Image: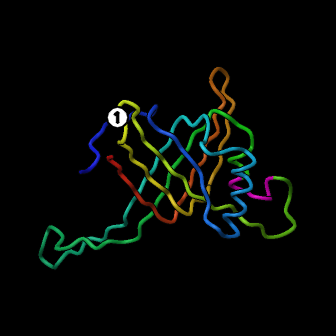
Amino acid sequence: MPNMSVFSGSDASISLSVDHSVEGDKAKGIIDAYSLTPVARAVNVTLKVSSDLKPFHEAGQLYPNELKTGNVTITGTIDRAYTNGALLKLLLGDAASGHPAGAWVQPSFNITLILNNPALPGVMSSIVVHGVKFQTWVFGIPEDNLVIEKVEFIAAWISVDDKMT
């Protein structure tokens, strides 16, 4: 039976994990040093999966006869009301500590979004975004509001798991 529960942001948590690779090992050091599981103070998270569909139009037809699946792109953003350099280091790796002498390894990691309503024990939805790399990091200091950092990411693939026990 599929999960039919309604969740709110207060039911969510975000965790980071890594796969064993050079890029994953670089991310693991940062994730462990900054205790990024769970990610604290996240206020807005977006996740977008898009498919580059190609309609096939037969001569003389107004509507497509077929929609061909194209490239799939997975992107998203995370806003965080806490700035300690962790997310910037996940973008830049060793380059966040100074000017690198040459090429550097950009960390790669997985983001797990977990939705779990305490009023419904045993009902949980999780989305794992695999092979994530941060693309941009934005930092703003507003005059009269919270300081927020924002990262945009691209991922290699995604998986979903609904659990009802």
Q: Is residue 129 left or right of residue 55?
A: right
Q: Residues within 10 Å of mark 1 (few under 14, many from 20)?
A: few
Residue 48: horizontal and vertical position, in percent?
43, 53
Q: Is residue 36 left or right of residue 44?
A: right
x 33%, y 46%: residue: 165
Q: Is residue 1 left or right of residue 29?
A: left
Residue furthest to the front: 165
Q: Provide the residue designation for mark 1.
A: 120
Q: Is residue 94 magenta?
A: yes
Helix, strand or loop: magenta stretch: helix
What's the coloring here?
A: rainbow
**Please, what secondary structure does the residue beneath circle 1 have?**
loop
x 68%, y 39%: residue: 139
Residue 46: horizontal and vertical position, in percent?
47, 45
Residue 103 vs 136, above or below: the answer is below
Q: Is residue 93 left or right of residue 48?
A: right
Range of the magenta residues? Answer: 90-96
Residue type at tag 1: Leu
